[in-house]
Amino acid sequence: MKILLMGNPNVGKSAIFSRLTGVDVMVSNYPGTTIEFKKGRIKLDEQLVEVIDVPGTYTLEATSRAEKVAVSMLEEGDLVIDVVDATNLERNLYLTLQLLERNIPVIVVLNFWDETRHLGIQIDAKKLETHLDTPVIPAVAVTGVGIKELVSRLPEARAHANRFDEGGRWSEIGKIIKEVQKVTLKKHTLLETVEDMSIKPLTGIPITLLILALVFWLVRSVGENLIAYLFNPLFKLYLPAVTGLSDMLGRGGIVHDILIGTLIEGKIDYIQSMGLLTTGLYVPLAIVSPYVFAFYLILGILEDSGYLPRLATLVDAVLHRLGMHGLAIISMLLGFGCNVPGALSTRILETKRQRFIAATLMAIAIPCMAQTAMVFALLGPYGIKGLGIYFVTLFIIWLVLGFLLNKMLRGEVPETFMEIPPYRMPYFGSLAKKLWMRMRSFLTEAIPFVLLGVLFVNVLYVLGVIEWISEATAPLIVGILGLPKEAVASLVVGFLRKDVAVGMLLPLGLDMGQLIVASVVLTMYFPCVATFVVLFKELGAGDLIKATTIMVVSALLVGGVLNALL
Amino acid sequence: MDVSLFDLQTGQKATIKQLKGGGEFRKKLASLNIRIGKTIRKITAQPLHGPVVIKIDNTEATIGMEMAKKIVVEPLGAE
């Protein structure tokens, strides 16, 4: 047996799913968080039953790719839990009525039950139950209210085969609403004032700039402090162990070079040595993970508050000129964490053209947090100037390339039409869970790749492959980019892990200009392998070739220009 | 006097009178309950031909400028 969780976007399906099955899923306060269906299990009468969390859809006549997934899932289900936003009952009932025409048992959950009271909405759930002729259960998904009742009443779900046309559905809904819902008009609430202020351009744009500055400052200071007061002391404690091992191995030789790396002035240097047990652990754990942690903590708060759809509205006019919908800004933000979820999230965009532009721009101009952390380490000593030039250059590339792609590619951007959820207080439990899920996937996916990257560097050096490549590419690297020919090793490794690649620039003794050129080129020239695989799945081979060609060409072009200027 | 949602003054409430578009257009709007007879409040319009933002029931909706021009409303007077 299969149970489907269905409903409009952003009604809390994933929160209910995770309550029912105990499976961890991402829950956020913006439409389109769930882009793929997720499966879990629940025990019913001593029997394991599959529960599927389906992406949100407003109707069963799907338009976006995520919605089509939702509708096609319906064929396989045996029971539907229809999650309804109780604060927007009227429009949510449209999908409910459509589901009640499908001859599949449906049970209705009225989520956000706690919010109805503050909004002056009174719903008679019992009466609604009589009208729909199937159980209706008030619930608060994030805290778990109503979940027990939902499970116990699942067997009561009734199948129907009503027949309505569109007009018929709305007039039926009109009748139901009249009988079950009473709305006491409330005055403009404080929350509403804040909502209005953050979306009106005159106040909303300054608020956005303030938030972005705050995010940048918080990520940097939380990250820096974690490194200085937690991770560096820890790795100091670890130093005698690796130093001892280094002495045991005779301070040289192939095994030593792979495990410990090269000694710098007779000592282990965690960033430059390039050994599995030194750089391979220090980079992902001590430099990258603090920033990843800081970024995801703050992103989680932004996601759960409901701010992101407002940001999407504010930037919509600009993003339209770059060939995208305002919502693409969420893909970009996710990309700053890691390009993989960023690329996946482009599915919320309706057209193939938009998804191509958004994914390409993100892969070119948005450095992931792992890379950003290393750039902080590399350019940080040059103060705001070095970092400023790096980020401003990428921002200009993002703007110019988007503008050009939008001009050159056939087709246009469809009109924006989206829902903006109310602000909600981020719920600590789901914030912590989301942060943990993201950290876990970073640690389990990044560390093996970093180790692989470090191993790969050593093997290539030992085999003389790097020397051979740097001779072959010297005209490009030296001639156009103005970097020493050894810098090509970092570009080779960049395909595996960009953080390791940025770290490899350190021993080259570059000046600030060269460091900026190398950092920008490393960001742009090619996606890392994890992003590459996802882009292949999302865009297809043809568009991926197009996207990567754009990357290589524009990276050389921009690198050359920067080299001439700096 | 009826005006388009695009021309409606910011902050004003209005009743939706007419949707100048085909079935697809009406269905899209109906997904957020934007239908003839419903009351909305225009919160703002973004500059540079950006979208219009309205409040309908308990949701806000962002509506592209061209779409907003095709939604005819009757103002109910400023708040």
Image: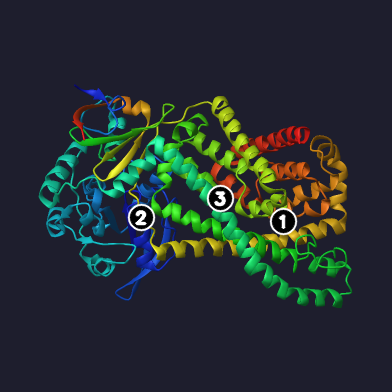
Instruction: Find residue A500 and name its label.
Output: 1
Question: Quick check: A387 left or right of A153?
Answer: right
Q: Is residue A504 above or below residue A428?
A: above
The number of numbered discs placed on residues in the rendered structure image is 3
C-alpha distance separating marks 1 and 3: 23 Å
Q: Chain of mark 2?
A: A
Residue identified by numbered label 2: A76
Q: Give the residue drawn at x 81%, y 60%.
A: A458
Dividing the picture into quadrants, the one containing residue A350 is top left
Q: Give the residue drawn at x 41%, y 66%.
A: A429
Q: Chain of mark 3?
A: A
Which is in the foreground here, disc 1 or disc 3?
3
Q: How is the image coloured?
A: rainbow
Sooner in the amino-acid sequence: mark 1 or mark 2: 2
Residue identified by numbered label 3: A216
C-alpha distance separating marks 1 and 2: 45 Å
Q: Residues within 10 Å of mark 3 (few under 14, many from 20)?
A: some
Task: Check the picture and name the quadrant holding the N terminus of chain A.
Answer: bottom left
Q: Residues within 10 Å of mark 1 (few under 14, many from 20)?
A: many
Dividing the picture into quadrants, the one containing residue A222 is bottom right
Pick whichever, B72 or A441, lies toward us. Answer: B72
Sooner in the amino-acid sequence: mark 1 or mark 3: 3
Q: Give the residue drawn at x 89%, y 69%.
A: A252
Question: Quick check: B39 left or right of B53?
Answer: left
